[in-house]
Image: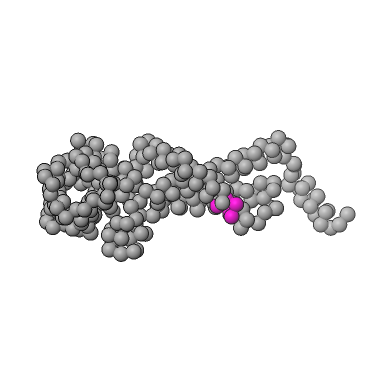
Amino acid sequence: MSDISKNILKAIDEKHIKPIPKWQFILLHVGLFIMFGFAILLGSLATGIALFHISTTDWEIVPRIAGGLHSFIYVLPYMWIVVLIFMIFLATLVYKHTNNGYKLKPALVVIVSIIASLVIGSVLFATKSSEGMEKALRENIRPYARYQESMEEIWQAPEMGILPGKIVEITNESLMLLDDFSGKQWKIDTEEVVLPPFAPKPQVGDQVIVVGEQTGKDTFEAEGIRPAPQVLKGFKRGMQKMK
C-alpha cells in the first residue's frame, strides 16, 4: 500500500469519516438539478420580459429623452438583464457541484445556460406569456410596480418634446386637452399634426404620446400624436386612479 493510501485511510479513521447513505446522495443531486432548472427558468423569464420591454419601446422617439443616441441607455430593461446574468452564474455554480459537473468546462455550461435562457425566453415572448407575467408582477408586487413606474417616468419630458398622457377633451380640430401622468393638464395645439395614412384619429380617452415642442407652462405644440406603447402600461393604472 502506498504512503498516499495509508495517509488517506489514517485521515478517514482519525476524523471518523463515513460515506453518506445512497438515498442522501441521490436526494442531494436531485435537489441540485432542480436548482439548476429553476435558475434556467428564471433566466428564461428574465429574457422574455426583457424582450417584451425592448419590443414595445417606441425607439423612434427615444433620442429625444436626453437629446442624443445615448438616450438608448435610459430605456434598457437593466433589472431583467441583471437577473439573467445572475441566474446564468447561479446555474453554472450549481451544475459544477453535481456528480457530472466535472465533465463540462464552466465556459461550456455558461454557453448552454445562455442558449437555453434565450430559446425558452423567446418562446415565452412569442406566446405573449412574458407579457402576462409582467402584468402579474406589476399587479401583485408593489415594489416592482414602483420600480417600473420610476423607469417609465423618463418618458414624461415635455421640455425634450415628449408628452405622454390621456386625451380628456378635443375642443376643435386644432386644440385638445391632455392630462399627463402627473395629473397636470395641457393645452395641445394640433394644427400642424399630420397623421400617417390610415392612422385612426385620436379620440377622447386615448392614451397617447404627443411629440413636439413645449411652448409655455401648460401649452404644447404637437408635431405628431402616436398611441402610447406597451412600455407605458404601468402609467395606465395611475391614470385610472386619478379619475
Q: Quadrant of the C terminus?
A: top left
Which residues are the magenta region? 110-114
Q: How is the image coloured?
A: one colour
Q: Does residue 202 appear left or right of residue 234 in this picture?
A: left
* In front of the other: 221 or 38: 221
Q: Please say whether residue 112 is one of the residues in the magenta stretch.
A: yes
Q: Is residue 165 above or below residue 67?
A: above
Q: Does residue 112 appear left or right of residue 229 in this picture?
A: right
Query: Residue at (16%, 51%) from the top-left corner?
Result: 190
Q: Can residue 158 be seen by looking at this rendering?
A: no
Q: Can residue 172 be seen by looking at this rendering?
A: yes
Q: Does residue 92 appear left or right of residue 214 in this picture?
A: right
* In front of the other: 79 or 197: 197
Q: Tell how many labels.
A: 0
Query: Residue at (64%, 39%) from the top-left corner?
Result: 30
User: Which secondary structure dominates the residues rendered in magenta?
Assistant: helix
x%, y% of residue 234? 31, 42
x%, y% of residue 110? 58, 54
Instruction: Name which quarter of the figure residue 63 lies in.
Output: bottom left
